[in-house]
């Protein structure tokens, strides 16, 4: 049972937390008729701290976990990471109820090492119009056992936190269309069929009936294995919508207005049983019928962001809270060592602030160190990103997925879609930081790609507008082959910037070994492993297009760069907690430099984006030796608090003050 359940309401610390923070010798605690009364027989009680308990409750809600500021993130798209158990691979019946509707008779999972654009045998049976629809129908069999098998690889890379794309039970490859929120996908665990029986035996709205399936139990093992390696774990959920196969939505379709869940969804019209037509209609996210939206009571215009209001159904909201608590404290004993470390919320801008504030309180009541990340992205695609400030005031999110940093960084380093001057880049970076407190800036998930965007190498290789016409179906001239050596130079500068800038660096699985790919679904190729064989990529999705042959293998040079950058960041906390100072923006020579400073520590980072070697003079905080952290054989001496150096074109330096 949970410790002191009545006291663990939203916005309150637990008695154990309170005791550890404020009391030297507590002797007695009594709970009377659901109301909280502390009766203390005290020996040297700290009464000043007791008076500040209410203030502490606020700080427990608003503070950013320190571990998030120090995190190096690794994002795993489970279906494409590793197939660790060949006996749980999806079947035709497992993928029913998601896009696309059609499943060819001889459909089967795709071999892991196939050429990405090579047609599967069942493609010829399909009535789907294009290759992209057929790619969405593919499955490769990635599962939790595959992740467990590769945790040492992740740990050896230097990762401290894993962000999983949805693990909830779902028919799709991406899992944003759940059949249930409360269970891990049956095909991610060892016994899919028996897990389905367990799920069917429960009452979805009564947590006391919920059991752990074999997939759930394997996930709990994964949490434990991550704990053993000092790796945090964050789950991904979209509370904005469910799948059309979600248990509550299926009941609603069956029973109509009489359904107990009739008020859970945005229903536009109900079916009239007296007519031959089916008038049932509902809102789906982005108009997608497979993603019916949870009903909201908005007190602002729907297009106004952030949205004001709350979820309509108290029961739907409570169900969400129950699911969230399930994974934060799986055995419900009041301790969180066996649970996850937070949540990433998908399409978070669609959720009203009233609900998001309540969700934060519920989560923090269970685990005050749980992280909540928001996907705050577009205000108007493809031009305007949404300013996240309203979500970062301590009552909603700790941080966001920081696309707002990556887009100008890509623009500057890759000249994409055109040339950006160093002074303009600095101006935009400063603008993006305004109105956000330091702890949240330090925890920002600084990502350069994801499951929803082209792979970083491909994004830099194609210098068009960010995430616009970023695949061959939208732009026949979009380059899908392995990026060239010049792109790798740009990528190296971008990575150095990522690991020295304020915020927590993020890796989308496979970036570290050089995976490439256009926008979704091409960014979701199966992970490249040394022990598996891969066909060369020779096929082009457009039949009239030619491409060069590309060997599919790990780029170990790039992998070693990632490892060195991660180690550098860990060994130099000034790169985590130091103040950022922009010390040079030379438009004429295309050079930018900034420093990270804290106390007697300083690291100076310099980029020469031009193609020629340049002589550079920089202000330094100290006189003395500055050593290059990327090549420790190289050093410079600051005199009169000035560093003079020469830097080749399209390269960077990271200089650490030594004495």
Image (spheres, grey):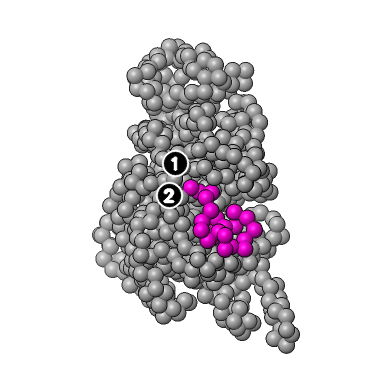
Using a 10 Å C-alpha cutoff, classify the residue at mark 1 as few (fewer than 14 neighbours), some (14 to 19) or many (20 or more): some
Element at label 2: loop
Mark 1 or mark 2, earlier in chain: 2
* Magenta stretch: includes residue 193: no
Are circles 1 and 2 on residues that touch, CB within 8 Å? yes
Say above or below: 173 vs 186.
Answer: above
The front one of 8 and 567 is 567
Residue displayed at 53% across by 49% down:
117
- Residue 622, given in percent of the width and then of the height, sits at 42, 19
Q: CA distance from mark 1 to mark 2?
A: 9 Å
Which quarter shows the C terminus?
A: top left
The magenta span reads 115-137
Based on the displayed image, in which of its 4 quarters is residue 464 positioned? top right
Q: Is residue 59 visible?
A: no
Based on the displayed image, in which of its 4 quarters is residue 346 positioned? bottom right
- Residue 322, given in percent of the width and then of the height, sits at 45, 69
- Residue 351, given in percent of the width and then of the height, sits at 59, 60
Q: Which residue is mark 2?
A: 113
Say above or below: 511 vs 269.
Answer: above
Q: Which residue is mark 1?
A: 552
Residue displayed at 45% across by 23% down:
653
* Magenta stretch: includes residue 116: yes
Say above or below: 216 vs 511.
Answer: below
């Amino acid at each position: 049972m949970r410790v002191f359940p009545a006291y663990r309401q939203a916005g309150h610390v637990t008695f154990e937390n309170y005791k550890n923070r404020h009391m030297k010798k507590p002797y007695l605690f009594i709970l009377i008729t659901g109301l909280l009364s502390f009766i203390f027989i005290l020996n040297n009680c700290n009464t000043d701290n007791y008076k500040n308990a209410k203030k502490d409750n606020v700080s427990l809600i608003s503070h950013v976990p320190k571990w998030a500021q120090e995190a190096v993130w690794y994002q795993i798209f489970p279906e494409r990471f590793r197939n660790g158990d060949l006996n749980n691979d999806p079947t035709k019946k497992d993928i029913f109820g998601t896009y696309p509707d059609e499943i060819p008779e001889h459909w089967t999972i795709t071999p892991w090492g196939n050429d990405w654009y090579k047609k599967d045998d069942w493609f010829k049976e399909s009535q789907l119009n294009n290759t992209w629809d057929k790619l969405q129908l593919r499955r490769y069999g990635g599962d939790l056992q595959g992740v467990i098998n590769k945790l040492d690889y992740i740990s050896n890379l230097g990762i401290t936190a894993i962000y999983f794309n949805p693990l909830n039970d779902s028919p799709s490859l991406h899992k944003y269309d759940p059949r249930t929120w409360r269970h891990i996908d049956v095909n991610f665990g060892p016994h899919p069929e028996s897990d389905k029986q367990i799920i069917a035996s429960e009452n979805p709205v009564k947590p006391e009936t919920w059991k752990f399936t074999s997939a759930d139990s394997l996930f709990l093992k994964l949490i434990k294995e991550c704990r053993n390696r000092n790796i945090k774990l964050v789950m991904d959920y979209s509370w904005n919508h469910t799948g059309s196969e979600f248990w509550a939505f299926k009941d609603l379709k069956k029973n109509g207005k009489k359904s107990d869940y009739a008020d859970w969804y945005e229903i536009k019209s109900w079916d009239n049983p007296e007519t031959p037509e089916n008038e049932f209609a509902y809102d789906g996210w982005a108009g997608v019928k497979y993603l019916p939206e949870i009903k909201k009571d908005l007190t602002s215009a729907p297009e106004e962001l952030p949205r004001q209001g709350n979820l309509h159904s108290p029961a739907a909201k409570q169900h969400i809270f129950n699911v969230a608590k399930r994974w934060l404290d799986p055995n419900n004993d009041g301790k969180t060592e066996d649970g996850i470390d937070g949540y990433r919320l998908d399409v978070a801008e669609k959720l009203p602030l009233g609900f998001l504030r309540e969700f934060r309180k519920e989560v923090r009541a269970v685990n005050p160190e749980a992280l909540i990340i928001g996907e705050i992205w577009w205000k108007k695609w493809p031009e305007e990103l949404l300013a996240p400030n309203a979500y970062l005031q301590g009552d909603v999110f700790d941080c966001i997925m920081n696309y707002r940093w990556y887009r100008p960084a890509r623009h500057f380093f890759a000249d994409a879609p055109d040339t950006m001057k160093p002074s303009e880049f600095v101006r935009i970076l400063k603008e993006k930081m305004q109105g956000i407190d330091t702890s949240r800036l330090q925890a920002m998930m600084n990502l350069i790609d994801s499951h929803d965007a082209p792979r970083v190498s491909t994004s830099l290789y194609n210098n068009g507008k960010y995430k616009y016409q970023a695949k061959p179906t939208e732009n026949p001239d979009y380059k899908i082959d392995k990026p060239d050596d010049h792109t790798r130079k740009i990528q190296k500068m971008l990575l150095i910037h990522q690991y020295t800038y304020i915020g927590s660096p993020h890796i989308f699985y496979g970036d570290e070994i050089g995976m490439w790919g256009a926008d979704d679904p091409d960014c979701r190729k199966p992970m490249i492993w040394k022990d598996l064989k891969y066909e060369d990529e020779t096929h082009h999705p457009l039949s009239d297009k030619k491409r060069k042959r590309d060997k599919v293998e790990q780029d170990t040079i790039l992998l070693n760069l990632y490892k060195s950058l991660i180690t550098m960041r860990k060994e130099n906390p000034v790169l985590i907690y130091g103040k950022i100072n922009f010390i040079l923006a030379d438009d004429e020579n295309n050079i930018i430099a900034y420093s990270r400073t804290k106390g007697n520590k300083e690291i100076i980072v310099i980029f020469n984006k031009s193609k020629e070697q340049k002589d550079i003079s920089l202000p330094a905080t100290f006189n003395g030796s500055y050593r290059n952290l990327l090549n420790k054989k190289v050093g410079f001496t600051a005199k009169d608090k000035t560093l003079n150096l020469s830097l080749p074109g399209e390269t960077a330096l990271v200089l650490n003050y030594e004495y």
